Amino acid sequence: MITRRMAALRLDIPLEMAQRHDLPARLTEAELAAIESNPPDWLVQSRANRTGKKPVWVELRCDVCGFSEAARPKKWWPAFTYLTCDDHGADELPDPAAGLSRTEVDGIGTRFIGIVDETP
């Protein structure tokens, strides 16, 4: 059995869309394969409307320990130099390059901190 969230990931749709179109909370691999091989009209239309400019899901991966999770990207996320789990210290990352300042951005995914190195 797979969860609705995992089905949304595999179908490359937002979780909200999966809920709105009554995907069950748990599906079998066979049920998901049936949806993928014979997509309903709403899924066909969703895929046709995609511009490709913004991904539906991104993989967040900690640059210290490698922990990863899939998340919906947010418009306000800057380009991160590093991503770390919120339980790692700044001393576990390389120092910013000469002339760059470092900013931390909290609230990335469920447990990440984004690190942005940029010119002041």
Image (spheres, grey):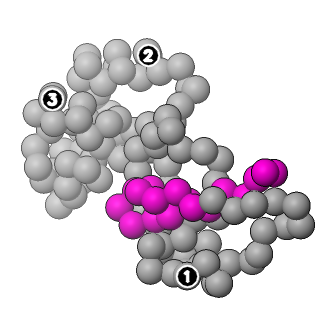
Choose mark 3 or mark 1, whichever is in front: 1
Chief SS of the magenta region: strand
Type of amino acid at the residue the image marks with label 1: Gly
Location of mark 2 (residue): 48
Along the viewing direction, whichever of 80 and 48 lies nearer the viewer: 80
Type of amino acid at the residue the image marks with label 2: Ala
Residue at image position (47%, 21%) is 50
Location of mark 3 (residue): 20
- The x, y position of residue 51, in whole percent, is 53, 19
- The x, y position of residue 19, in whole percent, is 16, 36
Q: Which portion, as a residue range, is magenta?
A: 104-120
> Disc 3 to disc 1, how far (Cα)?
40 Å
Q: Is residue 29 left or right of residue 79?
A: left
Q: Residues within 10 Å of mark 2 (few under 14, many from 20)?
A: few
Q: Is residue 117 left or right of residue 43?
A: right
Along the viewing direction, whichever of 75 and 52 lies nearer the viewer: 75
